[in-house]
Image (cartoon, helix red, strand yellow):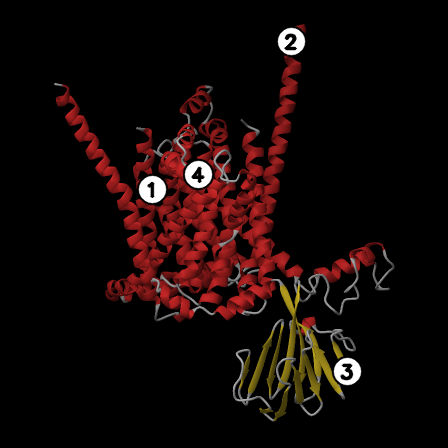
Amino acid sequence: MHAHGEIGRIQASYMAEVRRKRLYGGLTLLLFTVLMVAGFVIVDERSAGGFWDGLHRLDDYMSEVVAEAWQRRAELPGLIAKYFPALVETVNIAAVSTLLGVLGGLVLSLLSTRRLARWPRLIPLFRRLSDIMRALPEIVIALMLIFVMGGGPVPAVIAIAIHTAGALGKLFSEVAENADLKPVEGLASTGANWSQQMILGVLSQVAPNYISYGLLRFEINVRASAILGFVGAGGIGYELRNAMSWGPGRFAEAAAIFVLLFGTIVFFDQLSSRMRNRLTEGEGQ
Amino acid sequence: MTDMTVDPAKAEADRLFRRKRLVSFGIPAVILAYLTYIFFAFDLPGLVQRANWGNAVTLASDIWSHKVHVTRNNRSGEIAFAIEGERKGAYPEGRRPEWVSGSEDKGLTVDLGEGRKVRLLPGKRTEIVLPGFQTIEVAAQGRSLDSNLPEELPKWISASNRRIAVTLPGARVTLTGARTEVFRYFTGWELFWFTLDSPYHGHSLGEILFGDRIDPERGNIAGALSDWWNNPMWRHKDVAWAIGETVLMAFLGTFGAAILALPLAFLAARRFSPLMLVRAATRRVFDFLRGVDALIWTVVLSRAFGPGPLTGSLAILLTDTGTFGKLFSEALENLDGKQIEGVASTGAKPVQTYRFGVIPQVMPILLAQVLYWLESNTRSATIIGAITGGGIGLMLTQAIQTQKDWEEVAYYVVLIVLMVMLMDWLSGWLRGKLIGGRA
């Protein structure tokens, strides 16, 4: 009798708990749904074309592009060859900015990691610096530099490198926190200076991780470099904008650029993920 | 005897060292060679010549200062005073900067500091008094200018019979037949709070909060807030809307993609989707969505949906459906099967197995990934907005294209950085709350 009442009470309190949990879950879901729907309505209102009309136009536009590209399919290989140098420029921008960004991130991360920093008191400063560099969208710096330097690949390189350095600075520093300090101490006891300690003691430990992050970043930077081309920084993005602004009659050009850009992104994604897999496997051995 | 065992070991070590030496010198050499190629491919020597350092100086000084223009229209003889030379920053009738003296019909003196003065005289005449140089006298005759300037001019004066420009420290005088314009630089973002036509301009915060009623029609705080919010020069209201729009683009795109990707990810995961064909097809769809990239999606979608945040949200949504699909299906493949079996062993139907065996396991991982991308997408939304025309990205590109509103550009950049950092912090905090709470 007594035990029965006990079980009943436990069950009742359990059910109350479940109900409360369901209520909270339901409320969160409701809030989320309301936010999504309201957001969609606002966005729909503030856009030039509505969502449902747009769907039709999207269909028309795509079929127009495909039809014209198909009609002029014989020219496509020639067009792809024509735009290939622009593609090389885009990839070069990504590669150089990744290289510079990795170097910058390296320095920033070592300066902002506890126990490794050259000037431990300045750690917060370097952390905030890399936060700000990370938060700056590439386009901001690129557009300002284009005003000073004129269009071309260099503003894009600088803009992407700054963002990359900030982003990698944070990731690198997380890796470096876990580095074994014994080699550093050993080097310090032989009289090595700070940069020697870092290069010989820390970098050799974290190199696989760093390279893997760098490769991932390169993947992202290929996309970023194409986008910056669109605002005047040269490369395939620039050609894409030109082809787009010509409109009908130039859809074959646009299609050729689509194909090139798509192929490049997929190629570098695959390449970098394969290399990263090899790096992480090599680490396990 | 010992030599025989040492020799191969030494040879081995030597080979290893040779390889290490090759790698540690070879890789920097390859990088150096590549950078040399880039040096010429990107035409760096030419860049130094092409770069416009004057623009750099304008940019650097405009970011933290403002100009006050005094402009005489030579046709009507009217003289206007305006901050940044814009109508929105004009001084109201009867007011003018205190470094301007005299009257319009007898001649106005504009003091440029350190004894330099510009006199706007009747009859379209202008005198520029420069201690240590001569006094320049210019008279406008129709479209051309008559002046007493010598043949040999210092670098800071450029003159033709149509246009004379004198650049002074902290000021500039430009004369054409149609008008005479003088402006002086001052530090700070002027009119950031109130424009000159607002009654609250020039009052301190204390006066507004605790002082007497400034505008008899309205309460001080409400009036000041409304005037600040509707400031036509800095457009705080529009900027706030634009930032909201950008965050909204990122929010809708990220969570819309997560909602779409979740069911698709089940189709792509080996554990839940027995048909190889379905799996492969779904994965190719993910690869395609990701590979096309936000740029192409933006360009294509903007044709259909026009400029505005809708295009941006959809572009983020499509790209991220691919990204999330891939990440989610990987998470689903790495599930712990024991929990699912346990739930199934109690006689649960498939739906219940998913609900209680799968969802509680993967939800924290998926949410962490979605929240991580939310921050990154805020940055993407700014960039996409600049391309397609929506949100703060649009305002930024517009301000940059005018090539003179650099203080506004600086304002937007600060806000963008704060916005991204706030989203970063928010997503980290939510991640900690949602996932840390479960563990």
* Rendered position, A235 above or below B180: above
Q: Residue at x 56, y 65 (%)?
A: B399
The reply to whether the C-beta atoms of the residues labelled 3 and 1 are less than 8 Å apart is no
Work out whether mark 1 precedes mark 2 in sequence or the reverse, and give the earlier one.
2
List the residue tagged with mark 4.
A194
**Please, what secondary structure does the residue beneath circle 4 have?**
helix
* B377 on left or right of B105: left
List the residue tagged with mark 3.
B102
Q: Amino acid at mark 4?
A: Trp
Q: Position of residue B308 (x, y in %)?
A: 53, 60
Q: Position of residue B341 (x, y in %)?
A: 42, 22
List the residue tagged with mark 2.
A4
Closer to the camera in the image, B178 or B226: B178
The label nearer to you, 3 versus 1, is 3
Q: Chain of mark 4?
A: A
Q: CA distance from mark 4 to mark 2?
A: 72 Å
Q: CA distance from mark 3 to mark 1?
A: 74 Å
Mark 1 neighbour density, 10 Å: few (under 14) some (14–19) many (20 or more): some
Residue B53 appearing in the image: yes
Q: Chain of mark 3?
A: B
List the residue tagged with mark 1.
A273
Q: CA distance from mark 1 to mark 2?
A: 60 Å
Q: Amino acid at mark 2?
A: His
Q: CA distance from mark 4 to mark 3?
A: 66 Å
* Rendered position, B112 above or below B6: below
The reply to whether the C-beta atoms of the residues labelled 4 and 2 are less than 8 Å apart is no
Q: Amino acid at mark 1?
A: Ser
* A30 on left or right of B79: left
Q: Residue at x 64, y 7 (%)?
A: A3
Q: CA distance from mark 2 to mark 3?
A: 101 Å
In the rendered image, residues at marks 4 and 2 fall on the same chain: yes
